[in-house]
Image: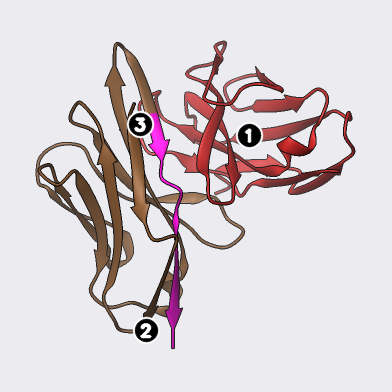
Amino acid sequence: AQSVTQLGSHVSVSEGALVLLRCNYSSSVPPYLFWYVQYPNQGLQLLLKYTTGATLVKGINGFEAEFKKSETSFHLTKPSAHMSDAAEYFCAVSETQGGSEKLVFGKGTKLTVNP
Amino acid sequence: NAGVTQTPKFQVLKTGQSMTLQCAQDMNHNSMYWYRQDPGMGLRLIYYSASEGTTDKGEVPNGYNVSRLNKREFSLRLESAAPSQTSVYFCASSTVRSYNSPLHFGNGTRLTVT
């Protein structure tokens, strides 16, 4: 069964510092990969997705993620954190097997940005 | 530009009571979903509706029922609430029943069962 592991339930960075949120997945077939962001008291919003093609994917708000098949990873990065990036981030993986498509979310990483 | 609207925003129930969570989308999406979010658990799919007139179980359907009333509306019913159903419930929609099609989420319903 596919699974998603987000390393670190809480990550704290200083404003202007690099943001790195880690995501590893297990999947027996090439997956679709997603990052969603959840601001306080809101639903999730799509940040970026990887389906096929270029392995470096750019998303909204300056975030990007790189699909590394050999490492089964899809880590999210942003060169310089902003206070408005404080939120919870969810990695998700989908795959289709036997005609059934499933989307599995990681448990989330809460990002705190310190002034 | 409402997107996905959920009502109510908050609800407190006693064990055994019933209620219906309402969800409506104005994006002409075909597929709609109900998730629950619990601390440290991520999101888990309860039920989904790939298109108007169809519904299917997700990962955690026990204790819930759904109705796809029309293309816009997808409701979630708790017939006899239990404390284990205390959670934040999110409705989502997408153009088609494919996760390549991004999910659009409502702002959630925070349910407490005492």
- Which residue lies at the image location 40% right of the left edge and 23% below the top edge? B97
Locate the N terminus of chain A and report the quarter of the image it occupies. Answer: top left
Q: Which residue is mark 2?
A: A14
Label 1 sits on residue: B24
Q: CA–CA distance between discs 1 and 2?
A: 39 Å
Depth check: give the residue in front, B53 or A67: A67
Q: Is residue B63 left or right of residue A94?
A: right
Task: Give coordinates of residue A75: x percent, y percent.
Answer: 24, 56
Q: Please tell me whether residue A104 belongs to the stretch shown in magenta.
A: yes
Q: Which chain is rendered red in the image?
A: B
Select label 3 or label 1 by which is in front: 3
Boundaries of the magenta span: A103-115
What is the spatial separation of the Cα atoms under label 3 and label 2, in whole angstroms? 34 Å
At 14% from the left edge and 36% from the top edge, which residue is drawn? Answer: A52
Using the image, determine if residue A18 lies above or below residue B6: below
Mark 1, Cα crowd under 10 Å, few <14 / some 14-19 / many 20+, is many
Output the chain of dot 2: A
Q: Earlier in the sequence, mark 3 or mark 1?
A: 1
Q: Mark 3: few, some, or many residues within 10 Å (few <14, many ≥20)?
A: many
Label 3 marks which chain's residue?
A: B
Of circles 3 and 2, the one toward us is 2
The disc labelled 2 sits on which kind of residue? Ser
Question: Picture coordinates of residue A110 (x, y %)?
Answer: 46, 63
